[in-house]
Amino acid sequence: MTTPRPVLVVDYGAQYAQLIARRVREAKVYSEIVPHTMPVKDMLAKDPVAIILSGGPSSVYEVGAPQVDGGLFETGVPVFGICYGFQAMAQALGGAVAHTGRREFGGTELTVAPEAGVLLRDLPAALPVWMSHGDSVTAAPAGFTVTAATPGAQVAAFEDLVGRRAGTQFHPEVMHTAHGQDVLTRFLYDIAGIEPSWTPDNIIDDQVAAIRERVGDKEVICGLSGGVDSAVAAALVHKAVGDQLTCVFVDHGLLRAGEAEQVEQDYVEATGVKLRVVDAADRFLSALDGVIDPEQKRKIIGREFIRVFEQAAREVAAEGDVEFLVQGTLYPDVVESGGGTGTANIKSHHNVGGLPDDLKFSLVEPLRTLFKDEVRTLGTALGLPDPMVWRHPFPGPGLAIRIIGAVSRDRLDILRAADQIAREELTAAGFDRDVWQFPVVLLADVRSVGVQGDGRTYGHPVVLRPVSSEDAMTADWSRLPYEVIARISTRITNEVPEVNRVVLDVTSKPPGTIEWE
Ligand code: XMP
């Protein structure tokens, strides 16, 4: 794939590298994450425009702390050090790092020196910043100007404009640091001299060119799930090779209200892709009949999905020379599965790597270098409908794992109705983008007594599970306004006759998971 020259973010093992890489891209500069074990010569082989050393263990003295190769600073490539990377840079270049005994974790106040330099130019004289360190830089290396201090770090930021190197003890990438993005941007534009050119239009042009080159005149197949990743991946491939692409949508009958129509009508209208719909709801429902165990549900759905997709792929392949399969693999999957090469490890059952040998395709993964927010931006730039672009993450097994108990058509209808109300009210209240996911769960085997009009009811509860999260690894329950929760509750109990009780899940993850099954 043709990608621009990257800013390399060297990962020292803390959780910050991906965040830094995203912030760099928000500044319209392409970035890639590399492990700290990568030799300097391999970094240089990537022809980087700058290198950023991320945070890591709290001390350069820690046993087993990753070493920073001093050669990194002799390459002429601009370098920015953050937290651990800042200390490592100071130490490698002849400054001093010491156990001062003054640890800082969390928010603290940064005092900008009168000579603020380039990095902190025109910022307020005192700034709230986020720190996480045990050691401190006590003396900057020769040639560096110290531009800020905090109560626990007399050297909290420095820069060397001639050597095009700078660093901060604080974390500019976290949102708790005021003006953090300004600090990063100034390093990139004003110290490293990088032009901001990583824009949606350029990304699309690069990807389209790369896909055309790879695919040539061969046919391509892509499974659509209703989610944003496969939708954007397919739209990019379609833009590149038009009707050489055939999309397959397996409707397993476990989607939410309106989602199948979104794929079959709105998406096709917006993109013009050739779509083959397989209505497999009956097949999935009969395979799931009477199954209660969530893992068994997942297995069955995964197995049926592969079978149905395989059949459709055979039919498409019979009509042309299909050589490629599109997958919506994202950059975090690539990074988490160990780096830039090889096949990413895809979690959901939509991974069709289980296809038989005579149906092996080469993968086209046009989103391999992209983060989710970039995929959304591309989706909009490619003209995809908003509800698809902004769809919350949704599990591959769909509503089957949001029915606690056996899955049936009736139960799916009940859950779909309740879920639709929750989604409508969330959207109406303007909270779609604040909430990461909002599962609505039907406790299908539970009944409780209620009263409605003159009569006693004996209905099912549904659970509202709105969560806030960055990446689904951890999550907290969303503090939605009570009025929004109240409207959802009233409407569900009024409009869905089988449901007579609505409860709110107030468990964080951990210890709870996002889904109930
Ligand atoms: P949990 O429930 O483990 O979910 O906190 C984390 C994220 O993964 C999604 N999820 C799934 N996605 N197939 C999927 O494609 C699955 O079987 C599955 N189970 C959970 C969940 O919606 C959340 O985003």
Image (tube, helix red, strand yellow):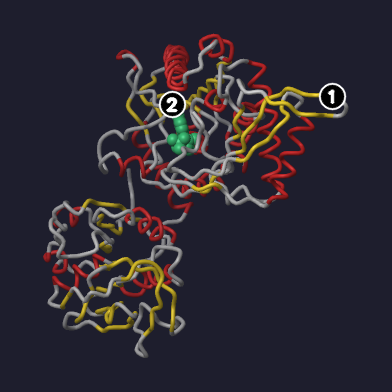
Q: CA distance from mark 1 to mark 2?
A: 46 Å
> Could you tell me which residue is drawn at 33 percent across and 82 percent down?
148
> Could you tell me which residue is drawn at 28 percent across and 61 percent down?
54
- Name the image quarter holding the N terminus: top left
With respect to residue 287, does 370 lie above or below? below
> Could you tell me which residue is drawn at 73 percent across and 23 percent down?
498
Quarter of the figure with residue 300: top left
Estimate the x, y position of residue 348 in percent, counting from the top left.
42, 29
Left or right of 403 on screen, residue 298: left
Asked if disc 1 is less than 8 Å from ligand 1, the answer is: no
- Tell me which label, 1 or 2, sits earlier in the chain: 2
- Does residue 238 appear anywhere in the picture? no
Quarter of the figure with residue 88: bottom left
Quarter of the figure with residue 485: top right
Secondary structure of the residue carrying tag 1 is strand
Estimate the x, y position of residue 416 in percent, counting from the top left.
66, 27
Left or right of 453 on screen, residue 364: left
> Could you tell me which residue is drawn at 12 percent across and 77 percent down?
94
Amino acid type assigned to the residue bearing label 2 in the image? His
Amino acid type assigned to the residue bearing label 1 in the image? Gly
The residue wearing badge 2 is 350
Q: Residues within 10 Å of mark 2 (few under 14, many from 20)?
A: many
The residue wearing badge 1 is 455
Q: Residue furthest right?
A: 454
Asked if disc 2 is less than 8 Å from ligand 1, the answer is: yes
- Does residue 160 appear anywhere in the picture? yes
Name the mark nearer the viewer: 1 or 2. Answer: 1
